[in-house]
Image (cartoon, rainbow, N blue to C red):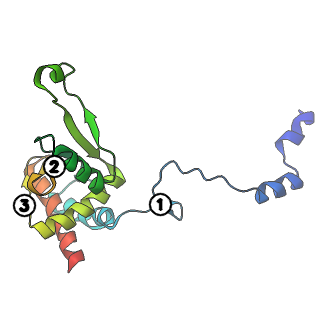
Amino acid sequence: MQGLRHYATPSSEAVGSELDAPKVKRNRSSISKKSGTAMMLPLHLHYEDVLRQDLLLKQNHANIMQVPGLYEIRLVPKAGSDLRVPIGKLAMEILSGQRFKEAQVDPFAKARNGSVFARQSVLRGHAMYNFLVRMLTVMSMLDSQAEIRENTINFFMETEFLFNVTIVTLADTKDETSLLWSGFMLNDEGETK
């Protein structure tokens, strides 16, 4: 064992050269980082710092992990004429900042009915909150209404943007979904005034 000690303890020369060597950046994501932690959008910070605590108290949950949150946002273009579909697709890509995905529902449907595709784009995480900030800004200008269901919030914007938006939440009831959405709307009103 004595002969292998020089491998285990680095010499002072080796330590000095390691400190001078340039460090390799090893970020797995393209999210901008500040002081080692991922930066959050103001709307995500509002959810984490204010809305989550408020929902915890209002709904009498046992712990913070039971509080509902947002799961994903689905953008689905309106099924319409072939001329309008590329415009809706482009609008979705611009607003969401992500490429549009087309998946065929049934491999034989194209042969039977023409072009039947399930077109949608799903946003989660940072992209979801980024899109939500943009959508709330547009929704406040258009005075659009939301349809709140058990665990989803639907916006039918096919007349303005040629696509519909569905926000999927982790809520169990319509009341929880409504409270969650009203908290996001209050934050939007506070920022614009």
Q: Residues within 10 Å of mark 1 (few under 14, many from 20)?
A: few
Picture layout, residue 75 above or below residue 94: above
Circle 2 SS class: strand
Rendered view: 156 above or below 139 = above
Residue placed under numbered mark 3 in the picture:
145
Instruction: Identify the element where label 3 is drawn.
Output: loop
Q: Are marks 1 and 2 in contact (CB under 8 Å)?
A: no
Give the answer, above or below, for where 164 lies relative to 54: above
- Reading the image, the residue beneath label 1 is 32
Residue lying at 23% horizontally and 53% vertically, measured from the top left:
91
**Of labels 2 and 3, the one closer to you:** 2
Residue 112 occupies quadrant: top left
Image location (x, y in percent) of residue 31: 45, 56
Q: Where is mark 2, residue-wise?
A: 163
Q: Earlier in the sequence, mark 1 or mark 3?
A: 1
Amino acid type for the residue under numbered disc 1: Ser
Q: Residue at 85% x, 40% y: name it.
A: 7
Q: CA distance from mark 2 to mark 3?
A: 15 Å
Residue 148: horizontal and vertical position, in percent? 8, 53
Relative vertical location of residue 174 with respect to residue 48 in this rendering, above or below = above
